[in-house]
Image (tube, rainbow, N blue to C red):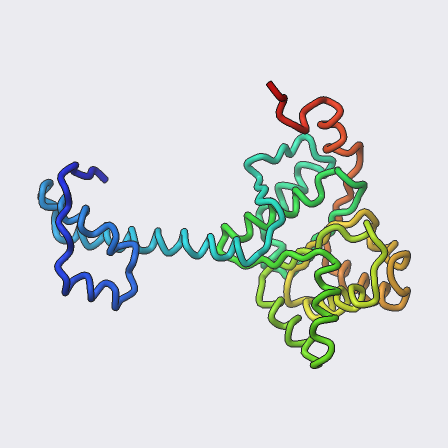
Amino acid sequence: MSVTQAAAPALPAELEALMRQLKMPYARALAPELIATARAQRWEPTEIIKALFVEEVTGRSRSMLATRRRAAGFPTGKTFDTWDESASSIPVPTQQALRTLEWIGRKENVVVCGPSGTGKTFFLEALGQQVVEAGMRVAWFRLEDLGALVRAHRADDSVGRVVARILRSDLIVIDDIGLLEVGADAAEGLYRLVDAAYEKRSIAISSNLHPAGFDELMPKTLATATVDRLLHHAHVCQTSGDSIRLTQALAGKGVTKMS
């Protein structure tokens, strides 16, 4: 859209009030400049209406995307823009299949397990960002976050309601299982979430251990019940190799050189 450089007159008060009442902030912000341009270039009335509606729809989409990103609680903001699929030990066809997001529509899970530093969290965060960009909701947790939720809501017996709220998201990510011993509250939180999401929502986890080894971290009975539900409809990706972070550090790529 070409916009003239002349100062745009303010909107008539009645029109501005109507746009406020209709909650059209993005169209209202553009309207004075757009009307000045339309006059100078002799636009058809329908062109003006269309341009205002396009601006409002675009602005709302940007705002909703930003809101979904904030609500997700992503740890760093990494996306596939900086992801090198050839450097990952996850097979490229598997990466590409997961990036279609079709598995979310089927309420399937994703498990990425392997040594520390092999890109598990990066890959899941980039997937989560893509889910948000597709108009869906994501909830991101560390295992200790689930433990804190259980402790905070056990006193008034509202843990079930909290889990139900989490399940409003289309994808729930639980990051970094296996780094620390799992406390009783965190183990309960993981089981409750996996059980409630079973065949209703998609869960993605990153772990240093394959889920078959979760009984090393939590009571065997609880681990068995959790893993049974988690893996029934799951895509399991095992990473391997040296830590990408350590490799970059040893190559001097972990910091910006001081002048």
On screen, residue 122 versus residue 7, left or right, reads right
Which quadrant holds the C terminus? top right
Q: Is residue 123 left or right of residue 243?
A: left
- Tell me where residue 100 appears, x and y as whole percent: 57, 47
Q: Is residue 199 above or below residue 39?
A: below
Q: Which residue is at the front of the view, 188 or 50?
A: 188
Residue lying at the far bottom in this picture: please name it: 156
- Outermost residue on the top side: it is 259
Which residue is rendered at x = 70% and y = 70% of the image? 196
Q: Between 17 and 27, which is closer to the camera in this rendering?
A: 17
Say which residue appears at 90% left-offset and 64% top-offset. Answer: 220
User: Vertical placement of 232 versus 81: above or below?
Assistant: below
The residue at the point 83 percent across, 67 percent down is 184
Side (left or right) of 256 relative to 210: left
| Quarter residue 159 falls in | bottom right
Question: Residue 108: which quarter of the image?
Answer: bottom right
Q: Position of residue 49 (x, y in %)?
A: 19, 55
The residue under the point 52% across, 53% down is 69
Question: For residue 137, which quarter of the picture?
Answer: bottom right
The x, y position of residue 4, in whole percent, is 16, 38
